[in-house]
Structure formats: C-alpha cells, structure tokens
Amino acid sequence: MEPFARDALPGRVVLGAGAAEDTVPAGAAQAAREEAVTAEVLASFGGADAPRYREIMESLVRHLHAFAREVRLTETEWQQGIDFLTRAGHITDDRRQEFILLSDVLGLSMLTVAINAPASAGATEATVVGPFFVAGAPEVPLGGDIAGGAKGRPCYVSGAVRGTGGEPVPGARIEVWESDEDGFYDVQYPDGRIGGRGWLRSAPDGGYRFWSVRPAPYPIPDDGPVGDLLTWAGRGPMRPAHLHFKVDAPGYRTLITHIFVAGDPYLDRDAVFGVKESLITDFAEHPPGRGPDGRLSDEPWTSVTFDIVLARLPPVPQAPGI
Ligand code: BEZ
Ligand code: FE
C-alpha cells in the first residue's frame, strides 16, 4: 500500500460534496487548544542551562508542531512515521547508518554543508561526506596507487592544492575514497579488505598525483526504509560516478568534496543532491600504454586533473600580552 494514502487515514472527518474543506475546520477554540500544547512544550525547555541547546530545541519544537498542524497529522500517519524511524534504527549498526542516509535523501546533509561551508570566492565547493568515509585508510606515497585491488579501469588523478590567493599549499593531507567498478565501497565487501581508499600529502609545489580506478555510478543502500521512501516518491537511488576528497592543511578550512565524471547519466538526479556544476570534471580515456608517470598499462586507462582550492581560516586572535 502506498504510505500516507488519504483513504487510509482514520480520524479525518470527510464532509459531503460541495463543502469548501474536506475536513472539519479548526475553529478558534481548536487552534487555541493546539497552541497551548506547543506553548507548554516550549516552556519546558526554558530552564535549559546551555543557551544553544535551548535555542535549537525551542526552534525544533516550534517547527515540528507547525508541521503537524499544517498537514493536520493523523494518528495513523504519526504511527507510520514512528514505524519508519524504528525500522531506520533497527537497520543501523557500525557499518550501516540509515539516519545519515535519511538526512542525505531529504537534502538536510547538503543544506548543512551549504550553511557551514559558505561559498568562498574561488574556493572549491564542498559536498556531502556520505557514509563510506572511514578513519584509518592507508597512506600512499605521491604517485602511489590507492586501488588496493578494487576492480576497475586504472585512473590517474593529478592536480595541485592552492589557497584562494593562488599560493601553493604543500603538505596538505589529501584523503580519497571511492567505489569499485561494480559500485561497491570496500566497507561493503564481505571479507573486510581495504581498497579504493588512501591518503597522501601534496608536494612542496602543492602538486599531487595518484593512481586509482575510474569511478562508477552506484545506488545508495536502498534495501531499508530510506529505499522505500525513494520508491514511494518515484525517485531513484543512484548517485553519479564520483571520487571523494577530504583535504586538510593548517590555516585552511577542511574541504570535503567529490569530483563527478562529466557525461554521467545520473548527474541531474543524484539521490542525495550532492552535484555542483563546478565539480563536474572531464575524465579522459586512453588506449593501453604508458601513463604520465611512465607506468605501463596493458589495458585502457583514464586520467583526470583536478585543482583543489582551499579557503583560508580567519586568523586566531592572540590573547592580550602574548
Ligand atoms: C557516497 O557518496 O558515498 C554517499 C553519499 C550519501 C549517501 C550514500 C552514499
Ligand atoms: Fe560515494
């Protein structure tokens, strides 16, 4: 059954033909009764010690209650929402995070990115981190291979890390992760091996280079409640092919982003709204032969160039007298 179908909503009083509304209109007394609930809950947070906690909770209550009033939430729908969240909890474990996935498909993750990584003139745009970043990826030397056995066409990735003033950023920590050609991240492999992830440092001139595999489009995990949500909306689970980057350098804002493969069929319908025009990048295809670093490939290979521009952090104010 389609969730939240109108005919499945007991508690709603349907009026006869010709009525202006299809439910009993809420009169002034009803509105006052509802507002009283909201006011009582708001007041319950008034004694919170931490001002930021109080601000967030009061705003959450105001918006949540306004939402319930706006859609005239029925008890059946409330229960369906609770069941949905319960399923999300049951499927979540150390390797599967259904709540982040829910935030992603509702666009909350990208909105939070937009709020916290405001466009800084010339800096590379940020996008979602996603659930497949894991700490402890192996370090690879400059020019090394992060594939670690992940299947896919070899891909040479190179570029430079610079600040928005054009200055090279040497020693930046560049962490990358991606799926294999079948659309699986290593954390989805049953045998626990590491592949398609690693980190390296930029050279003294800010340059970086490494081998990897050509990214492939893949579906976000859609065998749980978030997958149902997408199906009910007539939306697909696919993400366009991309390679994740996390770049840290002292004095600069940490950048979490991806590059997307130009021409990918899913660029205009990313399930998590992560695509930015500026991150769509040309991947060049090459016949078997030597790569830019002299490495011999006996199969076709791919290359991409991506310059990373970091925003400066504001200077830390010095304490008086230091
Ligand atoms: C990812 O790109 O790895 C990803 C992002 C959001 C949800 C699922 C996967
Ligand atoms: Fe990804």
Image (tube, rainbow, N blue to C red):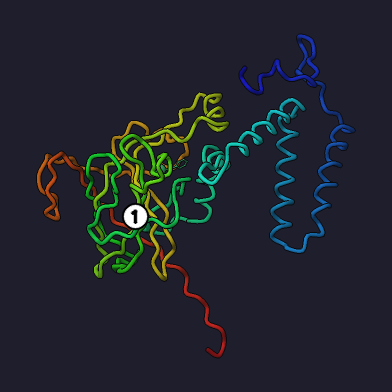
Q: Residues within 10 Å of mark 1 (few under 14, many from 20)?
A: many
Tell me the SS state at disc 1: strand
Q: Is residue 18 visible?
A: yes
Q: In which quadrant of the rendered image does the N terminus lie?
A: top right
- Can residue 279 be seen at all in this image of the molecule? no
- Which residue sits furthest right? 29
The residue depicted at 27 percent of the width and 44 percent of the height is: 213
Is 251 situated left or right of 51 in this image?
Answer: left
The image quadrant that residue 262 belongs to is top left
Up the image or down, 109 lies above or below 222; here it is below
Instruction: Answer with the quadrant where ligand 2 appears in the image.
Output: top left
Q: Quadrant of residue 136?
A: bottom left
Point out the residue furthest to the bottom here.
321
Residue at 52% across, 37% down:
105
Q: Residue reaching furthest front? A: 191
Residue 211 position in % (x across, y down): 24, 51
Pinpoint residue 320: horizontal percent, then vertical percent. 57, 87
Q: Position of residue 305 (x, y in %)?
A: 24, 51
- Hey, which quadrant is residue 37 in on the image? top right
Q: Residue drawn at (29%, 49%), measured in percent from left and top?
A: 148
**Of 49 and 131, which appears nearest the observer?**
131
In the rendered view, tell whether residue 252 sits above or below residue 127: below
Compared to residue 238, the image places residue 319 above or below, namely below
Relative image position of residue 171 (x, y in whole percent):
32, 68
Residue farthest to the top?
A: 17
Confirm or reject: label 1 Cβ below 8 Å from ligand 2.
no
In front of the other: 34 or 301: 301
- Residue 215, compared with residue 133, is above or below; it is above
Residue drawn where x is 18% and y is 42% of the image: 301
Q: Indicate the amino acid at tag 1.
A: Gly
Q: Which residue is mark 1?
A: 198
